[in-house]
């Protein structure tokens, strides 16, 4: 300390009475600067730690709800079958905090993990985990925006094919009632008797079947047997008129089957994507914790 005082005295040609207050002022200033810097370092550290905790908590919640949605997609995939007699219902759960985390700056989280004295030794594994996390968050955000439109398109197409099928079915019913009544008025003998006997048996069998209005039951127990019957008695003059609406019913039924199969594959893909994203985000959160 004496050497510093002597140096200042010689440098500025002043006495101890003058240099001492200067030195004290400088020391207070330097000490204050050091303390302020230390406080800022601690404050920045605590902020980064809070941000890291927030980020991992958000990731774990996103992972949990994404996995739940993956299970819903799997259930929906299993329902998308023409033989299914339940409603084609897709349960939907919001991916908690997905919108919130997407709106936050990636730089804020990056600084929390890769700046500061506590992050000096952070390796490449954490960097890869951090990068993978944002890739899957972006993918989930994209799918969450896309899926409602796909559901709407699926419902629109399904309703269209269903309405057209029902129209053809109603056309067949009206034509069959008119033709059968007209033919029976003229008397039923020979092949006509055989035809109508088999016809009545098919219709009765369908009517007493359980859930006889279901697409699959109607097609299996009514439409296909009637088409086979009409092929057997194709020489009868009215058979072609009865067959045309049955072919229409079958065409739109096949459209329904194809639509369900296409969407079944799509939602199996969503199931896998959400499940994989949930697992990888959860794994990344544990690495980043």
Image: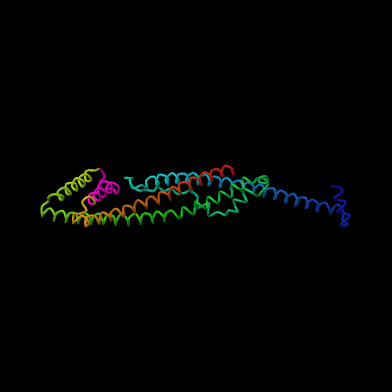
The secondary structure that dominates the magenta segment is: helix
Image coordinates for residue 149, horizontal then vertical, percent: 42, 56
Q: Which residues are magenta?
A: 210-230
What colour-coding does the image apply? rainbow
Image coordinates for residue 27, horizontal then vertical, percent: 78, 50
How many numbered circles does the render carry?
0
| Rendered residue at 12%/53% (across/down) | 184
193 or 83: which is nearer to us? 193
Magenta-span inclusion, residue 226: yes
Is 86 situated left or right of 209 in this image? right
Image coordinates for residue 86, horizontal then vertical, percent: 33, 45
| Rendered residue at 55%/54% (across/down) | 104
| Rendered residue at 84%/53% (across/down) | 19
78 or 181: which is nearer to us? 181
239 or 235: which is nearer to us? 235
Magenta-span inclusion, residue 177: no
Q: Quadrant of the C terminus?
A: top right
Is 1 situated left or right of 197 in this image? right
6 or 232: which is nearer to us? 232
């Amino acid at each position: 300390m004496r050497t510093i005082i002597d140096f200042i005295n010689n440098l500025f040609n002043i006495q101890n009475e003058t240099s001492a207050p200067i030195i004290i002022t400088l020391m207070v200033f330097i000490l204050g600067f050091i303390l302020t810097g230390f406080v800022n370092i601690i404050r920045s550290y605590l902020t980064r730690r809070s941000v890291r905790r927030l980020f991992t908590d958000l990731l774990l919640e996103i992972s949990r709800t994404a996995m739940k949605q993956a299970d819903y997609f799997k259930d929906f995939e299993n329902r998308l079958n023409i033989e299914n007699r339940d409603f084609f219902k897709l349960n939907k759960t919001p991916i908690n905090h997905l919108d919130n985390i997407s709106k936050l700056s990636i730089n804020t989280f990056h600084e929390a993990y890769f700046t500061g004295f506590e992050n000096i030794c952070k390796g490449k594994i954490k960097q890869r985990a951090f990068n993978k996390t944002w890739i899957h968050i972006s993918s989930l955000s994209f799918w969450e925006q896309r899926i409602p439109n796909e559901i709407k398109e699926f419902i629109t197409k399904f309703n269209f094919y269903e309405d057209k099928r029902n129209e053809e079915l109603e056309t067949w019913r009206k034509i069959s009632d008119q033709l059968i009544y007209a033919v029976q008025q003229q008397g039923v003998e020979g092949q006509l008797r055989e035809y109508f006997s088999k016809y009545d048996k098919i219709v009765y069998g369908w009517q007493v079947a359980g859930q006889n209005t279901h697409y699959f039951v109607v097609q299996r127990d009514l439409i296909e047997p009637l088409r086979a019957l009409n092929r057997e008695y194709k020489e009868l003059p009215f058979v072609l008129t009865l067959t045309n609406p049955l072919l229409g019913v079958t065409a739109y039924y096949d459209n329904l089957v194809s639509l369900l199969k296409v969407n079944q594959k799509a939602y199996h893909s969503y199931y896998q994507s959400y499940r994989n994203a949930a697992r990888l985000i959860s794994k990344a959160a544990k690495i980043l914790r």
